[in-house]
Amino acid sequence: MEAFRQAVVNTLERRLFYIPSFKIYRGVAGLYDYGPPGCAVKSNVLAFWRQHFVLEENMLEVDCPCVTPEVVLKASGHVDKFTDLMVKDEKTGTCYRADHLLKDFCKEKLEKDPKITEEKAAEFKHVIAVLDEFSAEELGSKIKEYGITAPDTKNPLSAPYPFNLMFQTSIGPSGVSPGYMRPETAQGIFVNFKDLYYYNGNKLPFAAAQIGQAFRNEVPNPSLISPRQGLLRVREFTLAEIEHFVDPEDKSHPKFSEVANLEFLMFPRQDQVSGQSARIIRLGEAVSGGIVNNETLGYFIGRVYLFLTYLGIDKERLRFRQHLANEMAHYAADCWDAEIECSYGWIECVGIADRSAYDLRAHTDKSGVPLVAAEKFAEPIEVEKLVITPVKKELGLAFKGNQKMVVEALEAMGEKEAMEMKATLESKGEVEFQVCTLGKDVTIKKNMVTISKEKKKEHQRVFTPSVIEPSFGIGRIIYCLYEHSFYTRPSKGGDEQLNVFRFPPLVAPIKCTVFPLVQNQQYEEVAKRIAKSLTAAGISYKIDITGTSIGKRYARTDELGVPLAITVDSTTSVTLRERDSKQQIRVSIEEVASVVKEVTDGLNTWNDVLWKYPTHSSAASED
Amino acid sequence: MEAFRQAVVNTLERRLFYIPSFKIYRGVAGLYDYGPPGCAVKSNVLAFWRQHFVLEENMLEVDCPCVTPEVVLKASGHVDKFTDLMVKDEKTGTCYRADHLLKDFCKEKLEKDPKITEEKAAEFKHVIAVLDEFSAEELGSKIKEYGITAPDTKNPLSAPYPFNLMFQTSIGPSGVSPGYMRPETAQGIFVNFKDLYYYNGNKLPFAAAQIGQAFRNEVPNPSLISPRQGLLRVREFTLAEIEHFVDPEDKSHPKFSEVANLEFLMFPRQDQVSGQSARIIRLGEAVSGGIVNNETLGYFIGRVYLFLTYLGIDKERLRFRQHLANEMAHYAADCWDAEIECSYGWIECVGIADRSAYDLRAHTDKSGVPLVAAEKFAEPIEVEKLVITPVKKELGLAFKGNQKMVVEALEAMGEKEAMEMKATLESKGEVEFQVCTLGKDVTIKKNMVTISKEKKKEHQRVFTPSVIEPSFGIGRIIYCLYEHSFYTRPSKGGDEQLNVFRFPPLVAPIKCTVFPLVQNQQYEEVAKRIAKSLTAAGISYKIDITGTSIGKRYARTDELGVPLAITVDSTTSVTLRERDSKQQIRVSIEEVASVVKEVTDGLNTWNDVLWKYPTHSSAASED
């Protein structure tokens, strides 16, 4: 596993899929560049995401800034709650995640201490299991109890304190407007709900989408046991998020039938709790059986499955795992993660959550702008409504400066409480009434408030929509894709192992390479003509005119995952070779760009074109 | 002009091309969202940029983080020099750009004070002209002299002080690693030069490219005279930058002939200084006549011209203006801005600069990693080289602890100084030698150093490449494109003016709308069938099934710049209407998606398809 990962990562770094950012300055932990092939793969993945989700579902794509004022992230809860608990080396000031240190300590004891008692082992296992729910105090006391010190220096550690994971900055020159680099793209959509709903003709459901950078000032994991997860845990990354707004009373989806028959690995909450493994379930059954909360959530699970497998993710190393009750926010109706298995284990790559009305309500409360939808009734409906009318003049006389608090408390009464007050006022003329904001009871008299039930005609139902949010960590998907696409095979001489990425054409960074078989001007002219026709057809290619053997040049292009290679070995026709099968056909110079286009655009498969053209097995093949 | 701009901006905001960011929280000056049509336009512009530059020129595209450590921006000069001079309202703390206040004061005096003397008028004009070169002290003394106060409160102002325009942040939890949000994307490419050069087979020239967000903590212009330039001067924006690395001794370009015959408005330095206007020049002449410094710079000017005009920028409102000597950095060899005329005047949208070796040298110096290229000679060349060999043993005996400084000083001698020392040592046996790092002279004896000239064979020439940098402000290009694409025309009744964006299909946010002529189930079924075929063909569309008149629906779609509209008015064929000509043809339901694709992909023009299908002028047309 470790060796496999090293082979993949070495290839990725050597061929510049990734470059550690600011490498000549010794880099910054958690920041990576996408070099040329990596950048092309990323563009391809994002273009396909737009095609598969935005275009297919007619989503409203928006593009909001990364710099975000504090008030927005106050409303969303990020300013107060988006924190990790840290401890500091009391002498050097180096910071560590408290939970990581405790987990590593327990793991190490379990794995490496042969003298540990059964009782102690059980305790360490328990700590690891409940670690995520520890408070700062609990973490601190465990760290003290176990005598855990700073891993690098063995110095004592501070008590755990919360560290906000957002990059903070300041907007404008006066220094009085704090801002943050957004930790997710979703908030930009929520604050625009009203405009987007209007743009959609005031109709539900609809989805908005956004692709963009997000920032988390993660602390690199210093653990010696668990691997660094270098390319998975980064400080800046591309998110692609969808916010699908839906009537909470109708979460059906008109296109659910298109995905209902998909079958794939699912891992429901129940199965996790009872210790079973993930199993293949038909999506239609998962929804009808109540395992997945609703059709819309199920529809997106299906679409995510299709998206990932089209990209080349191995379906046997892909599962949809339902969040356990304690993993889910209290407001969420249901939540599933698309997890992909790679050398680091099962990695969360897409989260698909029904977040109910939480986000829109939070911004409604904070901004005072109602982020709601309305359903017009075909005919007005008669409803009985509670009407509480405080008589402000009387209340003012009685309560002076406290009047406002009393009025608010009266208006906030629920139906039961109000009707009881009404009865008491009618029978006794006055009532004791608790005003929480004053911290005491006041006496309300009959002339201070009127309470009644009135019949009203309502023309519409006004409600806060639920939101179903599929959120894609693009960088993680791409990394897993690299592992799933990588394989080695012996060179023709058998003396080396050659690396290959079996990217589908959709993903491949370059669709085609062009090699003149030998260095001569005629062949180079032909190569240039072909290059021109490839550019005209919109196909990305690379010309390799080095004098290296054709076998070596094939190996070089296989290692970049280029699906097709054109070898110029005559002035009228060329050899076209497919990467994985190494099969070769002969195609005329005039036709070759269009054949490459057919295959890389997915209009034809390699097998489709294979029988149309003469196959080829000349001396030019491989080494 | 003002009214025209208002009409454009109102349309853009009403149809959600732009949304002021975080609007429900009263927004943040200088931050805008792209709403759905704006986001689609931006995607289209970027996709075309990739096609036109990256793919066409086989550029190496990279993708680097926005978060950048201080050391990188120290090397580039941004930490020290990327500043505006600000003054503060001494009571409220509100900040203003010092140069803006001074400029506004002078302008207002000139425009609105009838009693101004000729002498004073000349002075104000002079101040405006040389403003950009004022130091903090000069600005401060002028502000004092004129008695300029804070525009909002009339309070006194502080002395001017530099304010760095970068958003600052902190990387990691310890707070000791300052970082910034990058103010441009170029630095990410420069620091990767070595890897990219290697990736390109250690060959020059090659170009790297990057598209990404950049951040500048601009101060909104509070001026009452000059307009806010709201959508042009923003705090976060998308840049697309190319760094073309080239041998400073050979800046020819193999494809220059492809653009040499282009003719367009150019505004050379000479003509600006002598008070002439921009004039049409053939690009080939501009290069051969020495107006443009070199072929590669000229090639990119030509490619930028093609890029902008393909997008729909009016070539009569596009000019290439050469920087004046005082606008250009000292190291730059030549610099041209593509300026587009809009209601705000001529706006710099693309900068095309030959920055010589400045950036690579700066990072070489700061990082200690040589960012250089090498040219292998066909045959080794014999060169004479100075060789200074300090005899460390003797020097150690003579200077003890100071030996290292003496050795370094000896090795650092230039050719002239060394040959003089050699002569003196040979004639007198010793020489006085100044060691700056010791702050004194020492006596060097004959046995302490050998100095000679040796003939050496050199196999290659090592040099720092020049970089030619076309840098595109994508948001500014898009805004100008909106102005150039906007027009109004009377409705059929003549009672209203209707808005139209004449976007080419390449740019249009949606390629096609689908309307059932009347609300009935049959037509809606057909509309859905067509929608499906459009999705399969990868064409973005919008269905409008509202009961509004067909004329109103056309007006709505014209205002989004949708080039084609499909009206479903039978169950076998449909009406296809072109936006600008309002011409209509009848096409069968099976064919319509492919006809739309031909036209929007640019394989055929509307005129090409017009004669192939029966034209249509039924009652359904317009209102």
Image (cartoon, coloured by chain):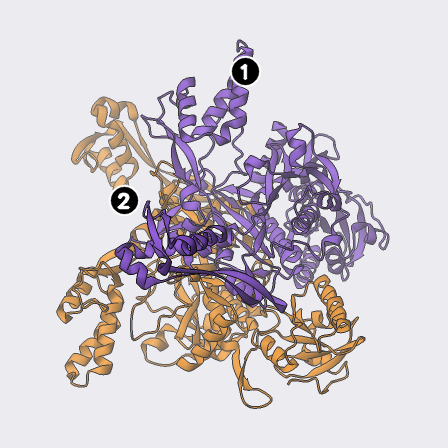
Chain colours: A purple, B orange
Residue under the image location 43 percent in, 26 percent down: A138
Residue lying furthest bottom: B494
Chain for numbered disc 1: A
Residue under the image location 25 percent in, 66 percent down: B99
Q: Label 1 to label 2, Cα distance in Å?
A: 77 Å
Q: Secondary structure at mark 1?
A: helix
In screen coordinates, is A614 left or right of A172?
right
Residue under the image location 54 percent in, 89 percent down: B495
Q: Secondary structure at mark 2?
A: helix
Residue under numbered circle 2: B416
Q: Quadrant of residue A112?
A: top right
Q: Quadrant of residue B397?
A: top left
Classify A262 as above or below B283.
above
Q: Which mark is residue A382?
A: none
Residue under numbered circle 1: A121
Residue A172 in view, yes or no: no
Is label 1 or label 2 in front? 1
- Residue B239, given in percent of the width and then of the height, sits at 47, 59
Which of the pair B458/A146 is nearer the observer? A146
Q: Residues within 10 Å of mark 1 (few under 14, many from 20)?
A: some
Classify A408 as above or below A284.
below
Chain for numbered disc 2: B
